[in-house]
Image: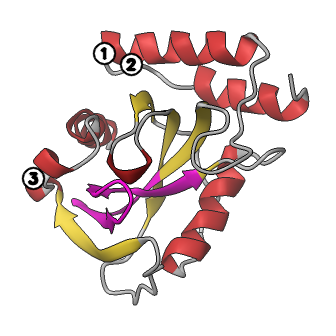
Amino acid sequence: MNGGKDQECRAEIASIVPLDALEQQHIEDALAWVDSGAPLFRTAKAATPPKHLVAYFAVVDDDHILLVDHKNAQLWLPTGGHVEPNEHPRTTVERELLEELGLRCTTPVAAPIMITCTETVGTTAGHTDVSLWYVVAGDRRADIAFDASEFHTVQWFPFSEVPLHRSDPHMARFLQKLVGSG
């Protein structure tokens, strides 16, 4: 176990109030994974170890969410990235926000509102992402300098128009939880 950082990640997971039985199962699975002493952080692309921690962050402005057309996953996703060894997931959010969108957090990153354990798809299919879902305030009028090596494009979607058929399999549940928390 990686001591302090593993325990910080455990605290992030334990702070989440589940939306439904599926999320309760994901919380229990993730806590058991952390407690097992298994490595939490990806050490080599794309899937070493085959289960690792990810920080998703939904950039939200009122009833709109910013999604990226992700080249590898071939899906519309919230931005995010792998939590680096010895990195707190909230630091991952700040780092990836700048790297992927050219944006800086204007307020401290709050606790995640959701967790999912998902088998990946697309060109890097076959491993499990344990994803903490964070929410970051955004501004639809702001210029976004997205990472064109990772994304085809970025787009703001009204919650009701998110392309769920081509998104994370948990996106509808996330939007339900997001709207319910607001």
List x then y, in percent, for residue 15.
59, 25
Q: Name which of mark 3 and mark 1 comes first in the sequence.
A: 1
Q: Are marks 1 and 2 in contact (CB under 8 Å)?
A: yes
Q: Which residue is mark 1?
A: 20
Indicate the amino acid at tag 2.
Glu
* Image height of 148 relative to 40, above or below: below
Provide residue 147's location: percent of width, then percent of height: 48, 79
What's the amino acid at mark 1?
Asp
The quadrant in which the N terminus is found is: top right
Rendered view: 115 above or below 29: below
Residue at image coords 50%, 37%: 131
Query: SS for tag 3?
Result: helix
Residue 62 visible within the image: no
Q: Is residue 141 above or below residue 56?
A: below
Q: Residue at x 40, y 31 (%)?
A: 119
User: Which element carries disc 2, helix, strand or loop?
Assistant: helix
What residue does disc 3 label? 160
Q: Percent x, y for residue 152?
A: 31, 76
Segment tinted magenta in the rendering = 57-81
Which of these two is toward me, 112 or 72? 72
Whether residue 96 is in magenta: the answer is no
Q: Residue at x 89, y 31 (%)?
A: 4
Q: Is residue 45 visible?
A: yes
Rounded to the nearest angstrom, the CA distance separating label 3 from label 1 is 21 Å
Which quadrant of the rendered structure holds the C terminus?
Answer: top left
